[in-house]
Image (cartoon, grey):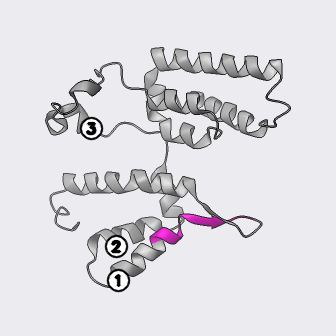
Amino acid sequence: MKQFCILLVDLFKFFKETMIPEFYKTEFYKKFYKGSLRTLVVILRDFPDILIESSFLLVENIPPKFNQFRNMILSAFPKTMQPPDPFKAAEMKVESKEEFKVIPGNLFNFEQRLYDIKLNDEIYQYLTQKGDMNKIYFRNICSKFLIKDERDEIHINYPVLNSFVLFVPWMIYKREQDPQKQNELR
């Protein structure tokens, strides 16, 4: 499964590198795009677990204008799960469903990305400490979401932000599973 994910990431990187206006209007590029889209439809229908487990890594590498690819990847759900009816959302009790209590598998190593820049410790300190120190931790955490490019322009560091979005609920879930550490988080 991991090898297939790597192939899809390489495909998306190819699309990113060839996003030159005069090239993507050619007949070859249009057919290649359609073929890639059809391949993704087959994967979505027959092997949705590949897209589910690698969704964060795939979405992170999709070119900005490829909304169809992004929507297809994010719409994947396990074959064993019945998708909820959007017209009966008010009646649905998420807390009572066992399938919502299980963390899905993930090929994306979000923890390592945060450990590398020492953000995991600051997040933990922010969630467990009380008082004036929280302002410092909050500023430090937010500063890691920004990067400067070669022209000194500030941009959002999406890989770190994506890792943060996955790490916080995962950490809270782990703390809830450990009775000794349940009271540590506010």
**Cα–Cα gap, marks 2 and 1:** 9 Å
CA separation in Å, label 3 and label 2: 26 Å
Q: Where does residue 141 sit, x and y in percent of width and height?
A: 46, 70
Q: Position of residue 178 (x, y in %)?
A: 20, 56
Q: Residues within 10 Å of mark 2 (few under 14, many from 20)?
A: some
Element class at badge 2: helix
Answer above or below: position of 5 versus 127. above
Percent across and percent down for residue 46 are: 47, 14
In reply to whether residue 74 is colored magenta, the answer given is no
Of the 4 image quadrants, the one containing the C terminus is: bottom left
Q: Are marks 1 and 3 in contact (CB under 8 Å)?
A: no
The residue at the point 77 percent across, 67 percent down is: 151
Q: Amino acid at mark 2?
A: Gln
Residue range in magenta is: 141-149
Circle 3 is placed at which residue position?
A: 102
Asked if disc 2 and disc 1 are in contact, CB closer than 8 Å, the reply is yes
N-terminal label among 3 and 2: 3
* 108 left or right of 77 in image: right
Rendered image: mark on residue 125: 2
Callout 1: SS? helix
Q: Residue at x 36, y 57 (%)?
A: 168
User: What type is the residue that disc 3 sits on?
Assistant: Val
Q: Dividing the picture into quarters, in which one does residue 16 lie?
A: top right
Q: Nearer the viewer, residue 166 or 65?
A: 65
Earlier-in-chain disc, 2 versus 1: 2
| Mark identifier at residue 133 | 1
